[in-house]
Amino acid sequence: MSAADFLNLFIAAVLLAGVYAAMSVGMTIIYGVMKIVNLAHAGFLMLGAYFVFEAYDRFKIDPLLGVLLAFPVFFFIGMGVHWLLVRRIATSDQPTLTSLLLLFGVWLVLQNLGYLIWGNSDRAILTPRTLSSIEIGPISFPTIRLAVFVVAVASLVGLEFVLHKTWFGRSVRALMQNKEAGQIVGVNVNRTAQIAFGVGIAFAGAAGGLLAMLYSFNPDFGATFQLRAFVIIVLGGLESFGGVAVGSLILALAETFVILILPASYQPAIAFSLLVVALIVLPEGIAGLWAKRRRWA
Amino acid sequence: MGVKEGGNVGGSSVSRFVSVVVPLLLLAGLAAVPFVGTGPNVIRLLFMTLTLVTASVGWNLIGGFAGQISFGFAVFYGLGAYTTALSINGGIPPFSAFLLGAIVAAVASLLIGLPTFRLKGPYFAIATIGVSEAVRVVMMNVPFTGGASGYRIIDKARFVQSHHYYTALVLAVLAVVISILVRRSKLGLALIAIREDQDAASDLGVNPFVAKLIVHALAAALAAAAGGVYARYSLFIDPDGVFAFRNGIAILLMPIIGGIGTIWGPVIGAFVYGIIHEEVVANFPQAHLLIFGSLLILIILFEPGGVVGLFQKFMRTVRARSSVGSHS
Amino acid sequence: MAPILKLKNLTRYFAGLAAVKDVSFEIEPGGLVGLIGPNGAGKTTLLSLIAGSLKPTSGKIEFEGVNLAGAKSFRAVRAGIARTHQIPKPFRTMTVHENVEVGLRFGRHEKAAGTTKKAEEFLEMVGIAKLARRPAFLLSVGDLKRLELARALAARPTLLLCDEICSGLTETESGLILRLLCDIRRAGTTILYVEHNLRAIMSVCDPVIVMNYGEKLAEGPPTAVQNDPSVIEAYIGKKATI
């Protein structure tokens, strides 16, 4: 394999990692603040995909713009779901099975909603951008992947800004580290939880839209990406944003380069196997390893 | 979550009478069905429901008694189905084929459990999803068993529906008996202790790892037997059918609907699921997940104890009202 | 007589902080040893290490000559060590009776026959026999503490580790428990007793070990320890100089 081919694959992996990171960060926020594993994440990815699709199909809104619109729309949907359902169950410092099952139920409902509204045929978002590519010397990559990558990274940067420069962001980080201490210093736990849930779902919806620009989709869409999100946040350490970036990169690289060895139909198994291995070998993810190294130093 | 059910908690003689007589009546009724002339469709429905009872009761051993919620039991159901199918085609008599499926699944459960039981609740659940799906994808690609196109069983025996029906019935009864025996045994005590507080259980001498591995193997064996019985009936299986993620969900949903952690909850839940599933798929094929998803949400929010929990609450209010009345 | 428990340089770190540091002492069989120290001194951590609930970072725990360091708690129970928890950890959906049954059936002497009767004996001992059929989640803190003790005793330990079993109890109830401890000790069980109630400790225990900041500060008979200047400093502070 030539250096150009290798570089192409590598860049493809990096571009993919960006989207994967945007896709997973929503779960990290929700888990970090509320210790809830959001199994409905897949459902919102799916809804986000259809949202952007409909915006493009009916209203001719450019998908990238559609993705940006998805943020506020899904933010409110997320807050709504929290108000309606999530706030009624007890949460603790440890992830609970009650929350797991509740959100699983929500996922089932969302999936069915998808089937009812859109049927189960595959859809795709095709714009002139979809088929063009950019060439720099021997390296070429599809424009769409670059565009999606840019939006993903921009949103992640935006999130970083919010987390570090706003009161809400500080509350979120406080609660992620120590819920009780956060309460003591005056963080409004319920409000922050609700907003955090909204932000998490916002990212899910927007990421769904981004993914819809790269892949065809149907109401089952969320499932494989959700599993990938699990892999990423487990690899990265469930509550670490830096970990999400690292985890995304590892998964994207593994998936991209494994095609050289195994037939493509085995690809989903990569994510699953990586997940299981990650859970067993790295229970605290890479972030945990990193933290431990600092301790030994 | 779970039902406040101690082993010997003040059960009145009435409720103890009910809990023995009702199941026996149900059993008698089910045994009589093929003779009552209800037609093959009803028998097929009950057959499916009875296989679901076995899988549901099995899952409840590890998910209900021990509190380890697995989302991936489809893997054992599927392993049972495929092992049975391969065995029957290889000339092995059906009941041995079921047993072989159960053994294969039990061994698989050890391989899966050993590394994953260290993980806490949701991580364990996620890991089980990963394993189940990984196996499904692999089976979709393995040519030996037909891959995605599925696998056919060539059963030399003539198809007699009632044979299959009674097999499923006997297996379901066996599952419930095993469930009762485990619950009443020292192992059952250990499992509940582990569920409530694994560390405290260990601090009192319970070896949580061994207990969980044993019950996981039992649970897997039952789920696999259910899969095997199903395979022999339908004569055709494919990875997207038996290893499907939604099977794993169904297997976990049934005990939750009926009352997780109880003896009869999984049985009730299987009947509820089986019948609703049949009706819904027939009349509203589109709303299948919606109904079960909503049911799950409602149960989690309002009555985590499922049908059994509702029933116990009902009995408590009845008892309270009657004792108030008698003091007047 | 050989000591029943020997700790050698026992250490446990939590992310760079030494909760227990280089602690060494011996307990003679049949002793009723008190362990005191200010909050955060590492007393509960030390108990957890001995019981096997926590793994030591380094050091040795010799119980009846066998090194148990790193063994999981159920192995320690089989060997003869049982503990109570500072914050009670009942099996909430089980009845009080069933809670004790767990200790009884998985503890050191496993007896299937006559289980019911024996469990009730332990409930009698700690004074909660009338709560036998009550689900544990309905109990008050004081009763939960006594359940902890009953459960641990049901496991028939040769070494009993008590963690603040009198907190949450009235004066009378505490007295009952202390008398119980003395009875158990006389029947042959060795006891290591962590407590905040200094009067209780000083009245029944000998020797008394004092910990602070994870280290052993002093060890000796109650009066000696009470007058040890470093112990006084740990609890109250240095004498002020004006």
Image (cartoon, coloured by chain):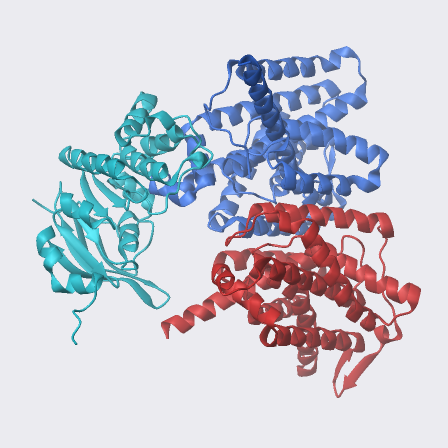
Chain colours: A red, B blue, C cyan
Q: Nearer the viewer, residue B278 or B171?
A: B278
Horizontal side of B123 relative to C41 (left or right) equals right
| Residue at 51% over, 17% down | B12
Q: Nearer the viewer, residue B236 or B205?
A: B205
> In x, y percent, where is residue B153?
72, 33
Q: How many marks?
A: 0
- The quadrant of the picture occupied by the C terminus of chain C is bottom left
Q: Please say if B69 is above or below C231.
A: above
Residue B102 visible: no
Snapshot quadrant of residue B287:
top right
Snapshot quadrant of residue A60:
bottom right
> In x, y percent, where is residue C127?
29, 30
Q: Please say if B318 is above or below A211.
A: above
| Residue at 22% over, 46% down | C193
Q: Please say if A297 is above or below A201.
A: below
> In x, y percent, where is residue B117?
48, 47
Q: Nearer the viewer, residue A68 or B107?
A: A68
- The quadrant of the picture occupied by the N terminus of chain C is top left
Residue A88 visible: yes
Horizontal side of B167 relative to B159 (left or right) equals left
| Residue at 65% over, 72% down | A159
> In x, y percent, where is residue C211?
21, 59
| Residue at 61% over, 62% down | A192
Identify the residue at the far bottom of this view.
A137
Q: Please say if A249 is above or below A77.
A: below
Horizontal side of A107 relative to C195 (left or right) equals right
